[in-house]
Amino acid sequence: MDNIRIAEMFNRMARLLEFKGENQFKTRAYTNAARTIKGLDEELQVLHKEAKIEDIPGVGKILKGKIVEMLETGTFESYEKIVEEVPPGIIEIMNIPGIGPKKARLFYEKLGVESVDELKKAAKDHRIRRLPRMGEKQEEKILRSIIRLEEDKDQGRHPLALGMEIAEEIKDELSSCPHIKKVTIAGSLRRKRDTVGDIDLIAISEEPEKAVAFFTNMKNVEEVLESGISEASVLYPENFRVDIRMVRKDDFGSMMQHFTGSKEHNIHLRELALSKGYRLNEYGFTNEGTGNLIPCDQEKSIYEFLGLDHLPPEIREDRGEIEASLRGHLPQLIEKEDIKGDLHVHSNWSDGINTIEELAEAAIQRGYEYIAITDHSQSTVVANGLSEKRLLEHIDAVERINDKCDDISILSGSECDIKTNGKLDYSNDILERLDIVIVAVHAGLEQSRRKMTGRIVSALENEYVDIVAHPTGRKFGKRPPYDVDIETIISVAKDNDKVLEINSSPWRLDLNDINAKKAKENGVMLAINTDTHAIDHFDNIIFGIDVARRAWIEPSDVINTMNLKQLCSRFGISK
Ligand SMILES: [Zn+2]
Ligand SMILES: [Zn+2]
């Protein structure tokens, strides 16, 4: 646990006590302690290790005991007790801007309101305005806050692809600012998380105030949220918050490192620095003995100083990357150039917009050795899925076009539905004729975990199946993953020598980084495919690569880094 989280927990405790009507000295002790903790230079974790928690000024003995309890267990007993006593919806109500513990208590006692939904209804029914010290205006304000909060939940995070697009656009515009030398992306966007909350930028500037003014006046800025001497936050279309920090050239490396994160990764680096007698922050290393500061104008110097490789941003999550680097076992992460072909492509035979010839041409331009045309199967009626008869014609068509093509191999395939009963959408006689069989779930997404898992398992046990596409079915902003036991899928895939897909569509990115890493660790091969429905989609491969890199995946873990000959021998294709 870091300081921020501990301080936040104390603040929550104070609010809960206030809601319960406890005396204000007790609540104030918690809020004061939270403030002190937020202002500490040192991490409590470190102080605890050095047995220095006692030395923190302005925090009482009892609360110090609770800090230790949190560091060791992640929570503290009296907090857990009070959380159990207060209805869970109350905490959400207290978090609505403009409503504190006192008002939450009023609504709870007088109206029996226990959740945000109930509060919204009470406001709509004009029951709030009749309460003591309330009125029409307060009631309207509460309703507006709730509505804004609801909208915010949906729009809080955006797909990586959208974040990258806006960030590149902003970088472009800033490049014409005479007061800015260099702009780079930091934060979760630089780490290529599949969704991003806001965009963090770092810029080198010797005239930070002028640079900030340029930034806040960019053409697409909708609102300036904050504007300081060397930093600013603005709101961009689509509710994208963009933060920028103007830094001196000498600090650029340490700033980049610090603001790229992740928080967990940085905590681990700081511990490592402390073990060498240095404090690390966004300005560089400070010698604990002499107080001398070593600034770092290059990010790699930070890592070098700590005896580490220059860790790729994608794996800076404190998921073992620091240990791996110290042991010299860092993975050689896959790169876009390693990809030799795409095994999940739709043509206008089903719901794609391009002909097979056009797709082949686009793949040649991207330097690919092969593609598999994998149109939908008959059950997917909305996607113009192919009947068995049309699939046989499709196989012939692919073969004909392939014969005319010297520069690329076109494999005949299918994205065959796994029906709700676990049966495949084509008979084995048909599947046997295909070079590549991808299977996928597109319907009956609401099935129970047991049924859904069993359904995919039976597909994996079919001898003609090669790859499971988008194995969890999630779509950003549309639906969460279906309920499936991914560990079982991974282990059955391993037993049957099947491949799991990282689908590169910006709306899917499925498997995600965590599951893809699990697959790799269990010895399952992955395919990084684009699920192309129009030739531009081929370029989405970079987002699949981002996921793979975050999952520590190396070229040898990925089936479509193989050349054509290796691929054919792996899948038993005679080409
Ligand atoms: Zn699909
Ligand atoms: Zn598809």
Image (spheres, helix red, strand yellow):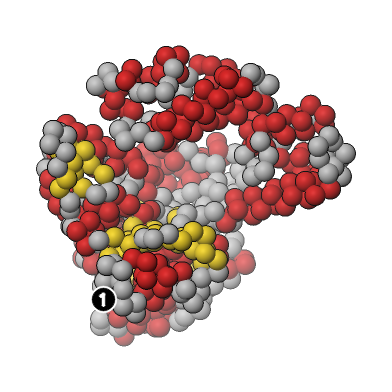
Q: Is residue 550 left or right of residue 81?
A: left
Residue 348 appears in the figure: yes
Quarter occupied by residue 556: bottom left
Dot 1: within a 10 Å radius of its alpha carbon, few (fewer than 14), some, or many (20 or more) residues?
Answer: some
Residue 499 appears in the figure: no
Name the residue located 77 percent from the left edge and 33 percent from the top edge.
107
Quadrant (top left/top right/bottom left/bottom right) for the C terminus? bottom left
Q: Is residue 117 left or right of residue 387?
A: right
In front: 172, or 334?
172
Q: Reply above or below: 545 against 72.
A: below
In front: 477, or 442?
477
Residue at disc 1, secondary structure: loop
Name the residue located 79 percent from the left edge and 46 percent from the top edge.
139
Amino acid type of the residue that numbered disc 1 sits on in the rendered structure: Gly
- Residue pointed to by mark 1: 367
Quadrant (top left/top right/bottom left/bottom right) for the N terminus? top left
Quarter occupied by residue 14: top right
